[in-house]
Amino acid sequence: MKSKAALKRIIETLKGIYPDALCSLQYEKDYELLFAVRLSAQCTDERVNKVTPALYERFPTLQSFAEADPKEVGEYIHSCGFFNGKARDIVACSQMLLEKHGGKVPDTMDELTALPGVGRKTANLILGDVYGQPAYVCDTHCIRITGRLGITDGAKDPLQVERQLREVIPPKESNNFCHRMVLFGRDTCTARSPKCESCPLRQDCDMGKSSAK
């Protein structure tokens, strides 16, 4: 596993590259972020951001979502893929938020993951971005890059990666670190053609060092 010095260099380097570690999904209300993350499954954030303005204009309140016909919701999110299941989850989630949580997005992992269509990745994002809690959002970028760097052991299971990151990434850095993993994964450490030669993390990257030999 990585030394504390190497981890610190990685964290600080990423801070320098991405000082504003913000979620790329656009939202104004807490539940909108919840729904946007659901839409982002097997879809790009860019596509989700193109779809949600019209969706939120048609359904401007949580109550309107709760009363919506999933088929109509599906028409607005069709281009995000798997739209039938996503639409059903959004409507059911809205109903549960109103019935069990007074219309508020809950602030605990157990309550969040009990909502339709909400897994640990979504829950961690809500806890970090909405409530400012330590959060380890293990999406495909985070899983891939932390494995390449050697911060994790290369596990592909999100829960395993989350547990490993909790052991080494300080809680106060966790949420921003994961956002920076996404940005870095899009810019440099891409899935198919990582830019190892120009990578600013190469000195502390297991894969980078291996490719240099």
Image (tube, rainbow, N blue to C red):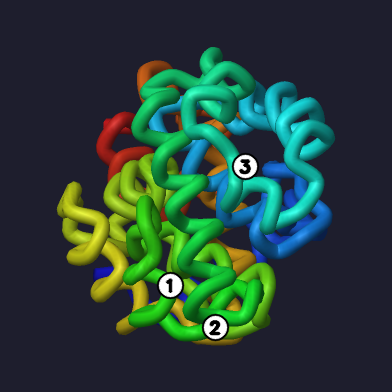
Q: Amino acid at mark 1?
A: Leu
Looking at the picture, how far across and down is residue 29, in whole percent?
Answer: 77, 60
Q: Is the residue marked by circle 1 packed among few (<14), some (14-19), or many (20+) residues within 10 Å?
A: many
The residue lying at 66 percent from left, 81 percent from top is 132
Query: Where is residue 112 shown, x and y percent of the image?
Result: 43, 72
The quarter of the displayed image where residue 8 is located: bottom right
**In the rendered image, is residue 209 in sight?**
no
Among numbered discs 1 and 3, the one appearing first in the sequence:
1
Looking at numbered disc 3 in the image, what kind of residue is underneath it?
Leu
Give the camera-side residue of 176 and 81: 81
**First in residue order: circle 2 vs circle 3:** 2
Q: How many marks?
A: 3
Residue pointed to by mark 1: 112
Q: Nearer the viewer, residue 76 or 112?
A: 76
Q: Are marks 2 and 3 in contact (CB under 8 Å)?
A: no
Residue at mark 3:
183
* Residue behind mark 2: 107
Q: Residue at x 76, y 53 (%)?
A: 61
Q: Residue 190 got which mark?
A: none
Q: Secondary structure at mark 3?
A: helix
Please name the amino acid that badge 2 sits on.
Answer: Asp
As measured in the structure, the alpha-carbon distance from the residue carrying label 1 to the one carrying label 3 is 25 Å
Q: On the rendered image, what quadrant is the C terminus found in?
A: top left
Tag nearer the camera, 2 or 3: 2
Look at the picture and state if 156 lies above or below 106: above
